[in-house]
Amino acid sequence: MEVLLECDWHACREKHERRVRRWIEPRLARASRNEPHPVEDFLFEYYAYRPAKLLGWHPGIGITLQGETARQYLSHKNYGQTAEGLTADASTLPPQRIESIRWCLEMLRRTNERSGAFGCFGLHEWAMVYGAETVRHAAWPLRVTPGEIARLVESIGPRCTHYDAFRFFTPAARPLNKHQPTRATTGALEQPGCLHANMDLYKWAFKLAPFTASELVADCFELALNIRVLDMRASPYDFTMLGYQPVPIERPEGRAEYEALQREFAICAAPLRERLIKVCDQVIEQAGSGDQAGLASR
């Protein structure tokens, strides 16, 4: 266990709060004006992790907090008291939670071991409007015609490996996909070149809370936000009014730009995935160690 003095962990908490407020405050301001943002709101709506949760700071597993104010963490789930202070405690996790973390660990490891696939060119967003009478972002214009969308989808063919992207394909687009992912095949198909698999590191990070250090959750959020921007820039929508210049994947130079950025994001995601794997390992080890005497979890 690493022990943090009260002044040190207060400084860490304040640093985290300053960092995430730059994402949270614009979101709350837009919500107060009922003003949706098709790019930045996605991480708060799709992943359903409330801004207040993102703002909250946790040290992560293996860290003990000293000082009287650390007792506030006893009001959170999965914290316990030791002789040295307060710490996240995995020893009383129910079997079903441990099983879900084991599944997450296996999925992350298998993803890490695979080679990335970089030839999808972001066609998943095009497949979501292929042959559709209505589109998801109806308030925003398309920058290409339905005919151009159809020609690109049919000529290149979507190659999506990610179920949570594939499930939003139009019925006409699904048979055109190289893969037919399902929820059950997530572990078998997830690969480190996929933008959505790398965005989902944010989901796994907050699902592992409070055992994930909040700095890691914020790192995953920041990566997911940057990936979301590319996702929308490469989409058939026109978001130039929001300051997002298109990545025109309908042209060879646009596909080259997309792939280069996709590779950069895969490089950025790899160490985050490794850190999440370590968290899973630590939780599973602590939960099964049987040496947690002295922890008084709530």
Image (cartoon, rainbow, N blue to C red):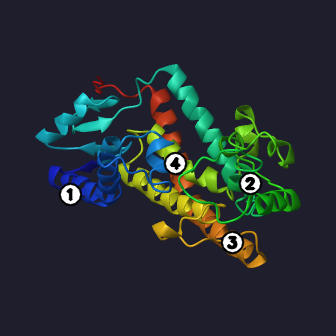
Place residue 233 in its image quadrant: bottom right
Q: At x 65% / y 66%, what residue is drawn?
A: 143
Mark earlier in primary sequence (4, 3): 3
Mark earlier in primary sequence (2, 1): 1
Q: CA distance from mark 4 to mark 3?
A: 34 Å
Q: Is residue 26 above or below residue 89?
A: below
Which residue position is annotated with label 3? 248
Residue 225: x, y in percent? 49, 58
Q: Name the quadrant of the C terminus.
A: top left
Q: Callout 4, which amino acid?
A: Leu
Which residue position is annotated with label 4? 276
Crowd band around label 1 with a 10 angstrom C-alpha radius: few (<14), some (14–19), many (20+) = few
Q: Callout 2, which amino acid?
A: Arg
- In what element is the residue under mark 4? helix
Which residue position is annotated with label 1? 11
Q: Is residue 69 above or below residue 227?
A: above
Q: Nearer the viewer, residue 202 or 143?
A: 143
Residue 197: x, y in percent? 63, 50
Q: Callout 3, which amino acid?
A: Pro
Which residue position is annotated with label 2? 114
Q: Is residue 112 above or below residue 152?
A: above
Question: In the rendered image, is residue 218 in sight?
Answer: yes
- The reply to whether discs 2 and 1 touch (Cβ–Cβ < 8 Å) is no
Crowd band around label 3 with a 10 angstrom C-alpha radius: few (<14), some (14–19), many (20+) = many
Q: CA distance from mark 4 to mark 2?
A: 17 Å
Crowd band around label 4 with a 10 angstrom C-alpha radius: few (<14), some (14–19), many (20+) = many
Mark earlier in primary sequence (2, 3): 2
- The reply to whether discs 3 and 1 touch (Cβ–Cβ < 8 Å) is no
Q: CA distance from mark 2 to mark 3?
A: 28 Å
Q: Is residue 7 left or right of residue 113?
A: left
